[in-house]
Amino acid sequence: MVLSLNWVQIQSPAFFITFQHIIFYISFSMRVTMQYYSEEKMHSFRLKIEKEILGWPDVTTKKMYGCPCYKYKEKLFAFLVTDGVVLTKASEQDKIKLSKEFKIKPFQAATRTMKGWPQIPVDETSDLEKIFPFIKNSYNQSKT
């Protein structure tokens, strides 16, 4: 192996690897293994929420990055993360109301903060009746 300050080079007849390749591999591996959702922890909550949401017209569910996502005609309006529900179509008025009722935060996707997507903290004791109107509003916003 030859080592310098800005790159690593391993030479053999089969391959040539630079430091940039290693960093790319590590960062790609971290993205792939990063887990936003634990079914084990959220199973009961997911079943309760889906009992309501999947009864709304034209709602489908799909997993994205391991998270259960809810769409209206292919437009994402909400998804679950471990210990939270994220709304992708929340109005500014709803964000203000949410901040008064819950300790919301913007959804953090790896190094990117989605400021327009409030994450509502939830657990087994969360009052779904307080959360459903906000999810329903996000659903309605996705129709426009």
Image (spheres, helix red, strand yellow):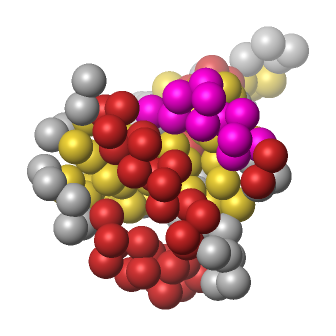
Q: How many marks?
A: 0
**In the orientation shown, which residue stands out farthest toward the right?**
5
Q: State the image quarter where residue 3 is shown.
A: top right
Residue at image position (48%, 61%) is 132
Residue 87 point in image, percent of width and height: 51, 43
Q: State the image quarter where residue 61 is shown.
A: bottom left
Q: Quadrant of the N terminus?
A: top right
Q: Nearer the viewer, residue 123 or 129?
A: 129
Q: Nearer the viewer, residue 82 or 135?
A: 135
**Residue 135, above or below 138:** below
Residue 134 appears in the rendering: yes
Residue at image position (24%, 32%) is 143
Q: State the image quarter where residue 38 is shown.
A: bottom right
**Residue 44, above or below 50:** below
Residue 80 appears in the rendering: no
Residue 49 point in image, percent of width and height: 42, 72
Q: Is residue 96 covered in magenta?
A: yes
Apparent side of residue 91 relative to residue 10 in the rendered image (left or right): left
Q: Is residue 126 covered in magenta?
A: no
Apparent side of residue 77 relative to residue 80 in the rendered image (left or right): left
Magenta span: 89-99
**Residue 24, above or below 33:** above
Residue 121 point in image, percent of width and height: 70, 60
Residue at image position (48%, 55%) is 133
Main SS class of the magenta portion in the image: helix
Residue at image position (59%, 82%) is 41
Apparent side of residue 108 relative to residue 3 in the rendered image (left or right): left
Residue 27 point in image, percent of width and height: 62, 36
Q: Quadrant of the C terminus?
A: top left
Q: Nearer the viewer, residue 8 or 117?
A: 117
